[in-house]
Amino acid sequence: MIENRPGLTLVTHAVLWGGVAVLAFPVWVTFVASTLTAEQVLAAPMPLLPGGRFFENYVEVLLHGAGNSEAPAWRMMVNSFVTAMVIAIGKIAISLLSAFAIVYFKFPFRMFFFWMIFVTLMLPVEVRILPTYKVVSDLALLDSYTGLTLPLIASATATFLFRQFFLTIPDELAEAARVDGAGPMRFFWDVVVPMSRTSVAALFVIQFIYGWNQYLWPLLVTTQESYYTVAIGIKRMIAGGGDAATEWHLVMATAMLAMVPPALVVILMQKWFVKGLVDTEK
Amino acid sequence: MEKRVVFRSWWLPYVLVAPQLAITIVFFFWPAGQAVWQSLLAQDPFGISVEFVGLENFANLVADEHYLASFQVTAVFSLLVAGVGMSVSLLLAVFADRAIRGAGLYKTLIIWPYAVAPVVAAILWLFLFNPTLGVVAHWMRALGMTWDPLLDSGDALALIVIAATWKQVSYNFLFFLAGLQSIPKSLIEAAAIDGAGPGRRFWTIVFPLLSPTTFFLLVVNIIHAFFDTFAIVDAATGGGPGQATEILVYKVYKDGFKALDLGGSAAQSVILMAIVIALTVVQFRYIERKVQY
């Protein structure tokens, strides 16, 4: 700090705590609602301190679901977890391979392929919903983990990021590997992949959150409740229109369950998360 | 930039890029091509007859007042999300950059909403602002404000703006904080020695030097508001009341899947693609050039 102004320091902390409180308030209310009975939630205004139904409510949604959705929350959590893991690992794997090919080989159409991958940045799923849905349905991939994950695995950002990183690996390493008689794949496994650990961790955090939070795509390709992810399931728990028909205490417990895994990933892996966020936007 | 040392193989590089390319072609280029092709066709909802109509679908859209209204809603929505979100984040980032004690803790407490799924964010705020049982709605009534996002289109728009902004604050905050920390301290110290107070230092030095970050975030926020908010709209308002919160991506979905207007939905997809391409080009051109005064 440049000059000492105790008043300004006080304002600084006040503004920051205010911001933190506003950001956390909805989650606090959600948590409180998830520990109340249905009647307590409906009594406007509901209490702002936790009630005694924490255990009962969470067991109820985890085992039996809520509202129109019969799917138990544990099942939806497993689906979200599988989806997020497959998307994150799949994206990283195929992007490592394609970036390696583009950086370490000279072959016809190299730059053409690179641009083909790069252009996909401009085609988010939201702008090509119907035809993509049709492709997946023609391939008989509706209601399957493959259908949920495969179309989301291609990644221009990850390919781009790994390409940038590979370009900074000293040429001497590849030279040495070649002198020692190591082939390209040996070099890839023993040198390139271990050196990319940091980028892989950072990307993993970002892509896990991306996969966990997918909404539109799972909404289209899943019709059976056994394939619902938690993001889809929670929407189905809200009854159309009628407030009394929605079991808000259970919906809020599901909301907490949906938030905790990605929030933990961000908080526990904050360093990788920040790096990933900054890197993927370069 | 190229590698001096490369490996040689006539088949291996193709095998390595094959998985990425296969997925790209099957799930990106083919559907995008289909969207362009279908936007030129007219099909009845039962799929019995298809007819090539040229640009008629686009002409219908331009003449459709619902579509123009949707454009307007999207524009207002994205400007509000970008404007409010960036102002709040900048304020928090400037203060977090000042605070020496507890800076790390504040950072953690501000960035976690990034992890919350848009649909969950929408449900959280829907619950708080629910006219009959929401806590905030109750306070607003106590203050004598009328509030009903199910009936009032302004209230519904406010609801989705709040949910989308809340989720985006952490992202903007991180980038503003990084931008602030990269400003040389010597400049600020020099201004302080010359007698400029904190407010003046902010407006004459810090804010202008932040302009590359601000511009980058503006584009990213508009892209976010255009394309990543489908879940928020679907869960919080369902496009209603009427079509008051029907943003463009929501309308593509609704016209395609609910109204089964394939040609119209495809034409909207093509227009959206043009918008993303324009925004991406802007992002890449200007970020390389570094906007600065």
Image: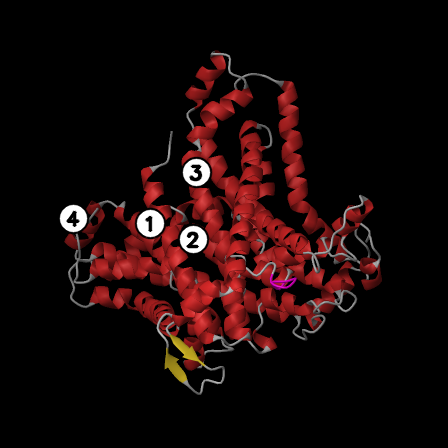
What type is the residue that disc 2 sits on?
A: Leu
Q: Is residue B241 magenta?
A: yes
Whether callout 3 and callout 4 share a subunit is answered: yes
Chain hosting mark 2: A
Badge 1 element = helix
Question: Which residue position holds label 3?
Answer: B213
Does the CB distance between marks 4 and 2 fall below 8 Å? no
Question: Which residue position holds label 2?
Answer: A203
Image vertical order of residue B160 relative to residue A39, above or below: above
Q: Which mark, residue B4?
A: 4
Q: Residue B41 location, x and y as percent? A: 38, 76
Q: Along the polypeptide, which appears first: circle 3 or circle 4?
A: 4
What type is the residue that disc 4 sits on?
A: Arg
Q: Looking at the image, which residue is at 38% across and 81% down?
A: B51
Region rendered in magenta = B238-243
What type is the residue that disc 3 sits on?
A: Thr
Residues A66 and B195: in front is B195
Q: In the rendered view, does B66 fall on the left or right side of A276?
A: right
Q: Looking at the image, which residue is at 62% across and 69% down?
A: A233
Circle 4: is it few (<14), some (14-19), or many (20+) Cα within 10 Å? few
Q: CA distance from mark 4 to mark 1?
A: 19 Å
Q: In the rendered view, does B219 fall on the left or right side of A171?
A: right
Q: Along the polypeptide, which appears first: circle 2 or circle 1?
A: 1
Q: CA distance from mark 2 to mark 3?
A: 22 Å
Circle 1: is it few (<14), some (14-19), or many (20+) Cα within 10 Å? some
Image vertical order of residue A95 relative to residue B255, above or below: above
What type is the residue that disc 1 sits on?
A: Met
Circle 3: is it few (<14), some (14-19), or many (20+) Cα within 10 Å? many
Does the CB distance between marks 3 and 4 fall below 8 Å? no
Q: Which mark, residue A195?
A: 1
Whether callout 2 and callout 3 share a subunit is answered: no
